[in-house]
Image: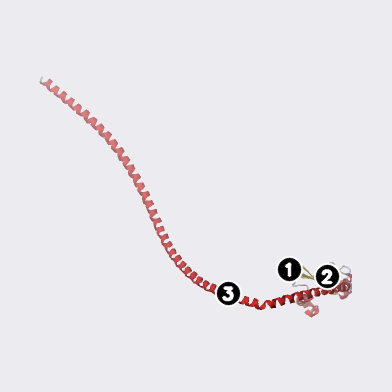
Amino acid sequence: MQLRTSNNEITESLCLLKHEHDALSTNFTESQIHLALERSRFAELKTSLANAESLTEGLNASLELSQSDCRQLHKKSAHLRREKSSVSWTLKGWTKALSTCRGELQAKTSHANTFLERLSNETECLNSLWQPKLQDSIKQTSDLQHLNGILIKCLDRANTNVSVACSENKKLTWHARKSGVYTIECQSLARKLLFGESSDVTTHRKTTMESTHITLSAPTYEPDADDTDCSTWSPQVRFVSVAPAIDHTAKSQFTHSKHLGELITSTYSNSPLATCEKVTMETEDYI
């Protein structure tokens, strides 16, 4: 009986122990679940803390940029204040100068008005004094115009007579060229003289240009001719120069001829040919 009783007690104790074990297992499982939840919450908090740190870094960077912008704005505001002060001083100076000019202009305007009033008074006095003389002058002018018409008619008649005389004289005038070509008389005269200079002008782009040619006796350079015999030479036309000219008067042509003579004689006198022949030329020899 005692063994049975002890066995029953042991069985009840085992049952109680089993119930306690089950309860402890349940509590352990619940604790594990709570631990997992806490771990997940801890991971979320850690992630949130990292995000907060990154946001803090971004805010710090933005704060630094804002501070640098604030410093630049402060510098710009100081520069603008300095510019404002300088502009204000400049405007004050200009305002003072304008006020001075305005006073001077008013004074000059008043002086000009006074002068105009005096001028108008003097003009009225002069009109009253010179009006009769002006009428006399107008009458004399009309008389002079009548006499001028008579003189113009006389001059027209005289010009008619002069043009008739010129046409008669033109028939007896000798020309070296006709239509840009040398006449036979001019060519025969050049053969007799054995030297001649001619020039002509034309206008190119509103500039007067003068060309110069020289006709002189020179060898023909033919194969059967003796170039050392002057009797075999013939008149040859040689180009000399083309240069701007002021006009085509005889005085200008003679001045140009003297200049060409100086240039040609100087060139020949300094040439090896003149040195070999021991001969020099002067400008008077060319002319």
**Total tally of numbered discs in the picture:** 3
Question: For the point 72% across and 75% down, which residue is it?
Answer: 138
**Mark 2 = which residue?**
237
Question: For the point 18% across and 25% down, which residue is it?
Answer: 15
Q: Does 155 appear above or below 37?
A: below
Question: For the point 18% across and 27% down, which residue is it?
Answer: 17
**Mark 1 = which residue?**
207
Q: Secondary structure at mark 1?
A: strand
Q: Nearer the viewer, mark 2 or mark 1?
A: 1
Quarter of the rendering containing residue 276: bottom right
Q: How is the structure coloured here? A: secondary structure
Q: Secondary structure at mark 2?
A: strand
Distance from Cα at disc 2 to Cα at disc 3: 79 Å
Looking at the image, can residue 157 be seen? yes
Q: Which mark sits nearer the N-terminus, 3 or 1?
A: 3
Q: Does 27 appear above or below 178?
A: above
